[in-house]
Image (tube, rainbow, N blue to C red):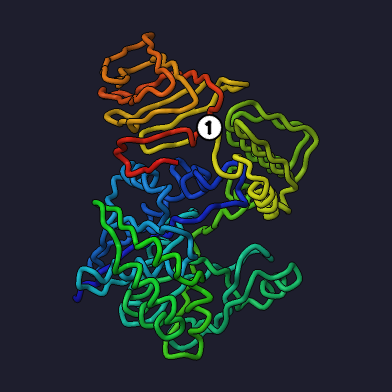
């Protein structure tokens, strides 16, 4: 039996604006635990790792994401025990067609022409065995040159998804048309007619087939992305296309660039129906749909109390949330923002995010607790001329060698051991010990131990913004803000 080389590809560059305030640009929904015990990204990686079979030779996943999330990706992959074949970092977002082109070029580097199994990083599946079987069938079809997309049989008149119109033929299902997100009346008609399927965004094809189709339909995207790829820089698993060249790549989705042009062309586009409890968790209503519910249809994450309420979702992260007399409502609480929405209108949360963005508010981008490649910090209090942070540094991790023009800092060790560079001195501090970093002093914090280091940092000064950092050395390739 001839073996088939398989290259999983995870598209991990989305922002998940409709799941605000939990999902934010700095920590988007694919890295959150919204269903089960692992993040959506980890679930996607684990599902793809299960595709290996007697005739399917599986490579490590290729992840397409952005620079800001690169250490989140690596940390979460390590937790699953998986090693990526490459982490392809987009210098700027250019939509999914250029992103997939980067993955195809990466896959063709080793001389093989593997079958690409392409999936978003932000979906959930409740029947993994059925998912595996469908993807394995799709891989074997794609090995012969077909483009195979997975369609979901709709169980409701959903207006939040794009649709595929498919028609049965002697060898399965042929894709006839892609349809945009419909209004409620049209969605009900699609459900009634029965030959329309939700577009899962999961598709399978050889790397060479994608490049040939893209060259046929959008040669401008193909040539511009290849130009950026040819000038790439490689740092261990990180692959960085040329920034200036990638900025010139036309922004387009996979569907618009290629898939919608395939029906009636020389590129056979097939569909497999996926019956695996699929959900893309695109909005809070979708999270409620897959959540475990009580007898009144209420679903809760965190500390929540319901009274005389029905079909309501509460997601609490930092305190008790109580609801009384509510029906079909979403309440999402974080340390710095609260969302209350009619559940049926949860798609409209993106309008709030757009307003936050327009007003340049931090709640659009980051949480109060901000993750960094070395650990995290939580801004627990602030006022005029002071800020208090709780900081965790991973074992063996080191912050940048830096200084500040406008603030001084006090560090108090709560647990673990701190190695502190303070000017020309290097000292070790243990629990309950502290030190003072004067304004303008070069300094660095490191964790030489085997357990997490936690400190309290008290900043004082005329300006306390994160852009008041001058970095002299950094282990993570970061430049000055």
Label 1, secondary structure: give it. Answer: loop
Residue 359: tell me if it is visible: yes
Residue occupying the point 49% across, 18% down: 458
From the top left corner, tell me how far across and down residue 219 is, in percent. Answer: 42, 82
Q: Quadrant of residue 224?
A: bottom left
Residue 72 as seen in the image, left or right of residue 109: right
Q: Residue furthest top?
A: 432
Residue that carries the numbered disc 1 in the rendered image: 465
| Quadrant occupied by the N terminus | bottom left
Q: Please rate how many residues cluster around mark 1, counting C-alpha atoms within 10 Å: few if below 14, some from 14 to 19, many from 20.
A: few
| Quadrant occupied by the C terminus | top left
| Front-most of residues 216 and 191 | 216
Q: Is residue 20 above or below residue 137?
A: above
Residue 423 as seen in the image, left or right of residue 27: left
From the top left corner, tell me how far across and down residue 103 is, in percent. Answer: 35, 66
Q: Is residue 304 above or below residue 26?
A: above
From the top left corner, tell me how far across and down residue 307 is, in percent. Answer: 75, 31
Residue occupying the point 60% across, 69% down: 162
């Amino acid at each position: 039996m001839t073996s088939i080389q398989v290259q999983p590809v995870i598209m991990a560059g989305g922002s998940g604006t409709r799941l605000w305030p939990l999902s934010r640009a700095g920590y988007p929904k694919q890295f959150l635990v919204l269903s089960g015990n692992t993040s959506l990204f980890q679930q996607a990686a684990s599902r793809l790792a299960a595709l290996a079979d007697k005739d399917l030779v599986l490579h490590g996943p290729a992840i397409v994401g952005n620079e800001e999330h690169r250490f989140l990706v690596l940390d979460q992959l390590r937790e699953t025990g998986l090693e990526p074949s490459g982490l392809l970092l987009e210098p700027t977002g250019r939509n999914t067609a250029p992103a997939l082109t980067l993955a195809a070029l990466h896959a063709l580097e080793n001389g093989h022409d593997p079958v690409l199994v392409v999936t978003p990083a932000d979906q959930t599946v409740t029947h993994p065995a059925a998912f595996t079987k469908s993807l394995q069938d799709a891989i074997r079809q794609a090995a012969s040159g077909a483009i195979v997309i997975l369609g979901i049989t709709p169980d409701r008149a959903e207006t939040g998804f794009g649709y595929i119109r498919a028609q049965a033929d002697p060898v399965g299902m042929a894709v006839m048309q892609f349809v945009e997100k419909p209004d409620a009346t049209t969605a009900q008609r699609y459900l009634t007619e029965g030959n329309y399927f939700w577009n899962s965004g999961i598709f399978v094809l050889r790397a060479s087939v994608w490049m040939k189709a893209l060259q046929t339909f959008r040669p401008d995207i193909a040539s511009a992305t290849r130009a950026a790829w040819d000038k790439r820089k490689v740092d261990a698993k990180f692959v960085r296309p040329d920034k200036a060249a990638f900025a010139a790549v036309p922004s387009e989705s996979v569907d618009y660039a290629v898939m919608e042009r395939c029906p009636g062309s020389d590129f056979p586009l097939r569909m497999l129906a996926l019956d695996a409890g699929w959900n893309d968790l695109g909005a809070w209503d979708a999270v409620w749909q897959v959540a475990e519910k009580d007898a009144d249809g209420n679903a809760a994450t965190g500390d929540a109390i319901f009274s005389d309420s029905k079909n309501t979702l509460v997601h609490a992260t930092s305190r008790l949330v109580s609801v009384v007399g509510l029906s079909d409502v979403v309440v999402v609480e974080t340390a710095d923002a609260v969302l209350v929405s009619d559940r049926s209108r949860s798609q409209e949360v993106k309008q709030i995010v757009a307003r936050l963005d327009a007003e340049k508010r931090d709640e659009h981008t980051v949480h109060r607790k901000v993750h960094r490649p070395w650990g995290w910090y939580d801004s627990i209090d602030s006022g005029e001329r002071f800020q208090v942070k709780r900081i965790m540094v991973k074992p063996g991790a080191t912050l940048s060698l830096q200084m500040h023009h406008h603030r001084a800092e006090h560090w108090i060790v709560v647990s673990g051991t701190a190695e502190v560079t303070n000017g020309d001195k290097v000292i070790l501090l243990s629990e309950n010990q502290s030190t003072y970093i004067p304004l303008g002093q070069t300094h660095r914090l490191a964790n030489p131990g085997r357990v997490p280091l936690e400190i309290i940092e008290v900043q004082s000064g005329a300006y306390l913004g994160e852009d008041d950092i001058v970095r002299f050395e950094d282990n993570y390739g970061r430049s000055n803000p």
